[in-house]
Amino acid sequence: MTEPLVLLPGHMCDARVFLPQIAALSQRVSVFAASIGRGDTIPEIARLLLRDAPPKFSLAGLSMGGIVAMEILRSAPERVARVAFLDTNCRRESPLNAKIREQRIRRVESGELAEVVRDEMKPSYLAAGERRGAVLQIVMEMALELGSDVFVRQSRALQTRADYSETLALTRVPSIVICGSDDRLCPLSFHWEIAELLSGAKLAVVEGAGHLPTLEKPERVTELLVEWMEN
């Protein structure tokens, strides 16, 4: 693979969520960890990313980053050489999740970002395991440093996102779908659907990982991404 690799982190995450993969994959290819903290909608976030991205690139998106990757495939498919989706969802926000998200937005706007991340988000993120404490600390640090404004804008973007099932069905590039076996936010059923929509995609389940397998089981995720890049 000669194209640079663009990594898109999840909601309230930054490049730190991909640090093990950046360290390993940068020996093989140019790696760019993009920010999804700009823009008020998924299409606007994608447009800003495309403005700064290489002319053609491989694309890997985790969680919200996967949703942004789907929008990039919808709006500029000719620029994507291959795509990897990790722990994400191709469907629009459900009314129940939109309501829960709205409650969190109001709390964060009232100054409770740390409490929302600590009490409502962190407990659902990860599988049990020896890395859990250290990874949760990274999650908290990323969220607090990104801040309340990014939380609100990203949350609004997720509330209003489109259904990308048709985009995936039209995608014809080498694809892989990766899911933590214990992901409670985006369970395995979501990833079966994504893999079935994509043409010839491999579905890989990372045992013992939750919503952030890039940090929970970094060696396994790196192996899968190398296999995908060399496809």
Image: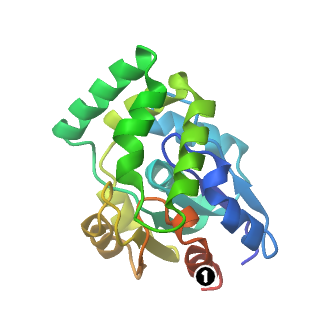
Res. 77 visible in picture: no
> In the rendered view, would you say 230 is above or below 86?
below
Residue at (36% x, 20% y) in the render: 107
User: Does residue 31 appear left or right of residue 69 in this picture?
Assistant: right
The quadrant in which residue 126 appears is bottom left
**Quarter placement of the N terminus:** bottom right
Q: Is the residue marked by circle 1 packed among few (<14), some (14-19), or many (20+) residues within 10 Å?
A: some
- In front of the other: 134 or 19: 134
| Outermost left residue | 96
Residue at (55% x, 36% y) in the render: 143
- Residue 227 image point, x, y percent: 60, 84
- Residue 19 image point, x, y percent: 69, 59
- In front of the other: 127 or 155: 127
Would you name the residue on which mark 1 appears?
A: 223
**Quarter placement of the C terminus:** bottom right
> In the rendered view, would you say 111 is above or below 53?
above
- In front of the other: 214 or 27: 214
Residue at (54% x, 46% y) in the render: 139
Q: Disc 1 on helix, strand or loop?
A: helix
Residue at (76% x, 74% y) in the render: 2
User: Does residue 52 appear left or right of residue 126 in this picture?
Assistant: right
For the image, the number of numbered tags is 1
> In the rendered view, would you say 73 is above or below 94?
below
User: Does residue 36 appear left or right of residue 63 in this picture?
Assistant: right
Res. 173 visible in picture: yes
